[in-house]
Amino acid sequence: MSKNTDDADGSSVLQSKRNATRYQILVEIAERQPAVSQQEIADAIGVTAQAVSDYLLDLVEEGYVTKHGRGRYEVTKEGVDWLMSQTDELHAFVQHVSEDVIGQVEIETAIATTDIGEGETVSLTMQEGVLRALSGDVGNATAVAVTDATADRDVGVTDFEGIVDHDMGMVTVVSIPQVENGGSATVDPTLVSDYADTHELVATAGTEALAAVRAASLEPDIRFGTVAAVREAATKGLDILLLATTSVLSAHTDELRDGNISYEVVDAAEE
C-alpha cells in the first residue's frame, strides 16, 4: 500500500492544499456513501469532476476508500482514522483562533469608575490616557462587561458601540545636541522644567536627553521604547514632552508624522 509525500512528511490540511482537498472529498464520501456522485462532490468543494476522479483513484490505492462498483464508494477504517486526526488538528487551530486571537481582539481592558457586574452595560470614556468604564448607558460609547469589578479595578469589556470621545495629544520635541556638540550642558534646566509643567508625560530618547532631564531634577515617565510609546500615549490624548538626542530625533518625528500626531520641535541649544 503506497503513501503519498504529504502523508509521509506529516503535512496537515492546514499546510497542504492536496491534503485539504483529500479531506473534503473524504467528508463528502462519508456523507453520501455508498452511492457517490463524483459530480456532486465536485460541485460541493469547487473542483472539476475529473479532479475528484483522480483523487478517488489515489484514495482507493492508499486504502482510505473502498470501491464497491461504479459510483459506489465507502470510507475505510484507515480513512476514518486519518479524517479524525486531521479534524482534531483543525479543532485545535479553530479553538486557538477563537480564544487566543479573536478573543484578544474583541475584549479590551478598562478601569472601573464604579462597581460593575458581569453582563452589565457600561459607558466608556478616555481619561488621562486610560479607558474607563462607568456603570450604565449614559455616554456616546458603550460596551458590555465580561468580568465583575469594583471601582478602580480592571474590568474586561466587549460588544462595543459608538465612539469613545477623546482628543489627540500634542508632542513637544526638544532637540538635545549630541555630546560632541555640547550635549546636555547646552540645555537650560529651567527650560526643561517649564515645558514639563505644561505636559502630562516626560519622555527621553538618548543619554544626553536623560542627562538634560535629570539636570532639571526630573525623572522621565518614558525612557525605553519611546518611538512607539510616545505615539501610543499621544493617540490616547496625552500631551508629551519628548527630549530627544539629535541622532535619534528623525526616527521619532517620522513616527509622529506617520500617525498624524501634532508635534513641534524645539532646539534647546537656541532657546
Image (spheres, helix red, strand yellow):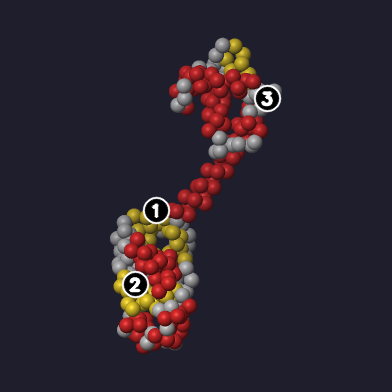
Task: Pick the residue in front: 245 or 7.
Answer: 245
Instruction: Answer above or below: position of 263 versus 103.
Output: below
Query: How busy is the neighbourhood of tag 2: few (under 14 within 10 Å), some, or many (20 plus)?
Result: many
Q: Nearer the viewer, mark 1 or mark 3?
A: 3
Residue at far right of view: 1
The amino acid pointed to by label 3 is Ser
Can the viewer see residue 156 in this picture?
yes
- Decide which of 183, 232 is in the foreground and name it: 183
Q: Amino acid at mark 2?
A: Val
- The image position of residue 252, as x and y in percent, is 39, 68
| Residue at the disc numbered 2 | 171
Q: Earlier in the sequence, mark 2 or mark 1?
A: 1
> Could you say whether the residue bearing mark 1 is in a helix, strand or loop?
strand
Tell me the quadrant of the picture where the C terminus can be found: bottom left
Which residue is most to the top? Answer: 70
The answer to which image quadrant residue 217 occupies is: bottom left
Q: Crowding near pointer 3: few (<14 within 10 Å), some, many (20+)?
A: few
* Label 2–label 1 contact, CB within 8 A: no
Mark 1, residue position: 159
| Residue 31 seen in render | no
Q: Which kind of residue does numbered mark 1 sit on?
A: Asp
Which residue is at 35% across, 61% downward? Answer: 258
- Marks 2 and 1, Cα distance to the nearest angstrom? 32 Å
The residue that disc 3 covers is 2
* Numbered circles on residues, count: 3
Question: In the rendered view of the protein, which quadrant contains the N terminus?
Answer: top right
Element marked by disc 2: strand
Q: Earlier in the sequence, mark 3 or mark 2?
A: 3
Distance between mark 1 and mark 3 Cα atoms: 52 Å
